[in-house]
Image (cartoon, rainbow, N blue to C red):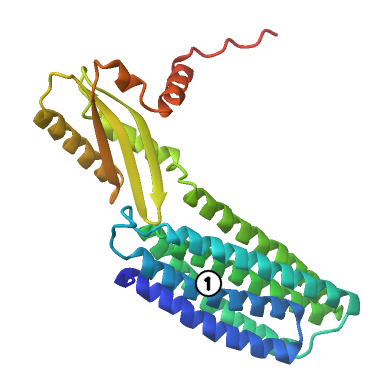
Amino acid sequence: MVEPRLRFPVVLSILAAIVTFAIKWIAYTMTGSVGLLSDVAESAVNLLAAGTAYVSLWYAARPIDPTHTYGHEKIEYFSSGLEGILIVVAAGGISWYAAVRLLSSQPPEQLAMGVTLTGICMFINLAVALLLLRVGRRSGSIVLEAGGVHLMTDVWTSVAVIAGLGMVWLTDRPWFDPVIGLLIAIHVCRSGFGLIARSFNGLMDHALPPPEQEAVRQAIRAFIQPEMDFHALRTRQAGARRFVDFHLLVPGAWSVGRAHDVANKIEGAVRAALPGAQVTVHIEPIEDRTSWEDSELLSMERLAQEADSSPPSPPAQP
């Protein structure tokens, strides 16, 4: 079941996609505009993407099971990647049709009605896009954010269509319409590749942004006593859930209970810095040499520390 706070925006985006697709199709059949056809293709992709988003959010909300012990959130990256691919495919189709129409110079008809219907769709998509972006950023859902970005692309597409039809009406030059269609295709294609890149990073367990990593380090350091240390910090995100794990080095003479108590306090501090994060702490004796050789991350951390502690380079001589 999709979370209630996420269900309404997704259902609303599906309804908006159905309504705008129908309106734009009517506008295209009345005008024959290439720009409007690109808008129709965009709305068709919106509808398919919104349905995919609902299914992915439903699957991501399922509890962990024996075969998915880390949860199902990564399907959100698959959904947003699929949406990016669909956007790129739609952009290719728009480009091809716009090129054909540019050569034939066939003028669009009933421009006033086309502009009016496109404007209605633009305001519908703008309202839904702003809602998706706000809820997506607040909840950390890449699916809702991707839907919002896609709808904002559709809004700008509609703006460009209206501008193109206006230029045709003012100048009586029909080639403005397919040229605008080509420009729309380029813009839409860039948006699609952006979603694909973001999804790829998520599927490859890309680390959290540097500010969030630093917030985690500050939370850990707040509880690090002089005889303690930590290293091998790893972070990643799957859907709206963030994961943090690291090695906590404590004196070997400490009891299990004492080390566990400190680890619990650090876990709480990290969750306070990154709400909802799942934190895993591996406790090791600080005196044991193998504790300093058990992760491939240690060499990278040493290089980073050396770079931070190195003195600044002297200024160049004139």
In the picture, the quarter occupied by the N terminus is: bottom left
Residue that appears at 69% across and 75% down: 38
Specify the amino acid type for callout 1: Ala
Residue at disc 1, secondary structure: helix
Task: Describe residue 56's horizontal placement relative to residue 99 as left or right.
Answer: left
Residue 180 vs residue 304, the one in the foreground = 304
Residue 94 in the image, given as x and y percentages of width and height: 73, 72
Residue 65 position in % (x across, y down): 29, 60
Q: Residue furthest top?
A: 317
Q: Residue at x 43, y 78 (%)?
A: 12
Residue 203, above or below 287: below
x%, y% of residue 111? 74, 86
Q: Is residue 131 visible?
A: no
Q: Nearer the viewer, residue 159 or 91?
A: 91
**Where does label 1 land, which residue?**
49
Which residue sits at x=85%, y=75%? 100
- The residue at the point 41 percent across, 62 percent down is 136
